Image (cartoon, helix red, strand yellow):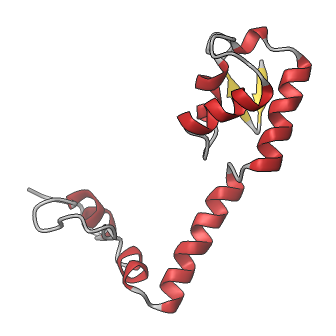
Amino acid sequence: MLYIMGKRMEPSKSVHIALQAIFGIGKTKAMLICKLIGLSQSVKINQLKRMHVEQIRRVLSRYFIIGSDLERLIQQDIQSFIKIGCYRGFRHNSRLPCRGQRTHTNAKTCRRVHNSTPYRR
């Protein structure tokens, strides 16, 4: 079993697919990492050598903010929005959508979680 940044990499998956299991790594970043290291897209996790694994870890730690560090950064940004009292902070604090989505007929689940009583039809 191979673990990279605390995530178990499935041995049968290709490298660029398996890297997407890490929080903060999507399709584009995974392809970029493979290109930086010089791996083809068809290489599976179980075919990697230790040198490639160390290069992946080095690239991830040097060039990207990922995992718990990224989650902490996102939470700090949300707390700063709430602290300065902007519209997005108010919406986050009220647990409502903050990107302009309709709430008259949609967004029932986010409103239901905030209430202490369960949702009834």
Specify the quadrant of the image occupied by residue 104: bottom left
Q: Quadrant of the N terminus?
A: top right
On the rendered structure, is 104 left or right of 56? Answer: left
Q: Quadrant of the C terminus?
A: bottom left
On the rendered structure, is 73 left or right of 120? Answer: right
Q: Residue at x 79, y 27 (%)?
A: 37
Furthest residue in direction right, as rendered = 51
Q: How many marks?
A: 0
- Residue 25 pos. (x, y %): 61, 41
- Residue 68 pos. (x, y %): 69, 54
Q: Nearer the viewer, residue 13 or 116?
A: 13
Asked if 112 appears above or below 68 in the picture, the reply is below
- Residue 24 pos. (x, y %): 61, 47
- Residue 43 pos. (x, y %): 69, 11
Furthest residue in direction bottom, as rendered = 84
Specify the quadrant of the image occupied by residue 103: bottom left
Asked if 10 appears above or below 89 in the picture, the reply is above
Specify the quadrant of the image occupied by residue 59: top right
Q: Residue at x 50, y 81 (%)?
A: 81
Asked if 3 appears above or below 23 in the picture, the reply is above
On the rendered structure, is 23 left or right of 98? Answer: right
Q: Residue at x 26, y 57 (%)?
A: 109
Q: Residue at x 16, y 59 (%)?
A: 106
Q: Nearer the viewer, residue 88 or 106?
A: 88
